[in-house]
Amino acid sequence: MNLRQLAGLSAVVGVAALAATGVALGDSGGGDSSPIYGVKIPDGYRRWVLIAPAQEAEPLNELRAVVGNDLAIKAYQESTLPFPDGTVLVKLAWKHVQSPEFEPASIPGAATTVQVMVKDSQKYASTGGWGFGRFINGKAVDEAQHQTCFACHQARVKNHDFVFTRWAP
Amino acid sequence: MNLRQLAGLSAVVGVAALAATGVALGDSGGGDSSPIYGVKIPDGYRRWVLIAPAQEAEPLNELRAVVGNDLAIKAYQESTLPFPDGTVLVKLAWKHVQSPEFEPASIPGAATTVQVMVKDSQKYASTGGWGFGRFINGKAVDEAQHQTCFACHQARVKNHDFVFTRWAP
């Protein structure tokens, strides 16, 4: 199948369905929706309940916080696995800088990425039921980066429905 | 004034008013309310909006997250200083441990302390309008530790209404 045929197929079956087949279109990102998955940054996520903070070592050197929508929080509190359809998790990330006011502390600097996982066991059946989105300045990164999401989650946290983050007690 | 007289005075004027005079009763903590300030852990704080995460270096070696009630979040979003009466900030803290599933990441371990700041410009007039509470396993630590709260906040963040944490963008 060549690119022209792929484009025609895309027009017929829709990009989401095509993506679910694993066909790479080479989307360079930059839109409001992620390549492959069509995931968007959800409205209002900055006020969602905190699941846990985290720190990422060099070279990223970030502070992070994962928040979830109501379905996510309920699932965490009730230890429900797999997470139900409709679950949305958002990871906020910032550069990790020393506090100018309290030397032992380090705090968020500039925002870096926003990363989203959306559970839809039908739509994303080929990736554990999860759609992924990775955004910089509100715009999705390219398809090549999105190709890496599920492989890592699958290799490392299949036993927790492909989700790394646990509830911070 | 001896301890018996102090106890009588306390009965007359109330512990909060007594505390506001700076008289040390040597409260060893362990109650639901903090010594000096009478601050409690607020109901429902674990579902409050995240203001920012932080990391604290050795020897504490903690991951932290500060959350706030609706008044706090509104004040942050509108850059309102000083914070209005009724503002409540809660800092959650956990031991900082390496993720067993993703080596570059470190994540929350056991919970350590919960620390609370309550704004009441009349009740806490002598400490910048803030009451402080520091809790371990839900019980307040002793008075000696609470004596140190305001001095540090006053010395370092007087220009931000005695509050260290800034909104993480």
Image (cartoon, coloured by chain):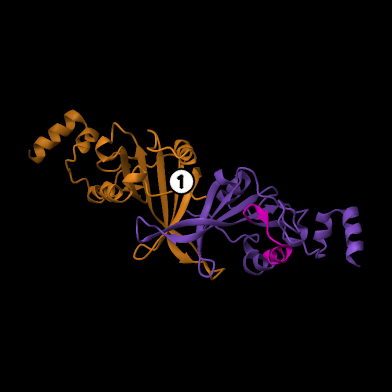
Chain colours: A orange, B purple
The outermost residue toward the left is: A1
Closest to the observer: A105 or B85?
A105
Q: Which residue is the site of mark 1?
A: A67
Q: Quadrant of the N terminus of chain A?
A: top left
Give yes or no for residue B133 being in the magenta stretch.
no
Q: Position of residue A140 (x, y in %)?
A: 31, 47
Instruction: Pinpoint the chain carrying mark 1.
Output: A
**In this view, which residue lies farthest toward the top?**
A12
**Viewer-closest of A121 and B80:** A121
Q: Position of residue B66 (x, y in %)?
A: 56, 54
Disc 1, SS: strand
Tell me the magenta residue range.
B136-150
Residue B76: image location, x then y, percent: 57, 51
What's the amino acid at mark 1? Answer: Val
Residue A62 x %, y %: 41, 60
In this picture, residue A154 sits left or right of residue B26? left
Q: How many marks?
A: 1
Residue depicted at x 33% and y 34%: A120
Q: In the rendered view, does B128 fall on the left or right side of B165? A: right
Query: A166 or B69: which is nearer to us?
Result: A166
Q: Residue at x 69, y 50 (%)?
A: B40
Task: Tell me, yes or no, whether the highlighted magenta stretch contains residue B144.
Answer: yes
| Residue A18 falls in image quadrant | top left
Callout 1 environment at 10 Å: few (<14), some (14 to 19), or many (20+)?
many
The correct choice, above or below, for B91 with respect to A79 in the image is below
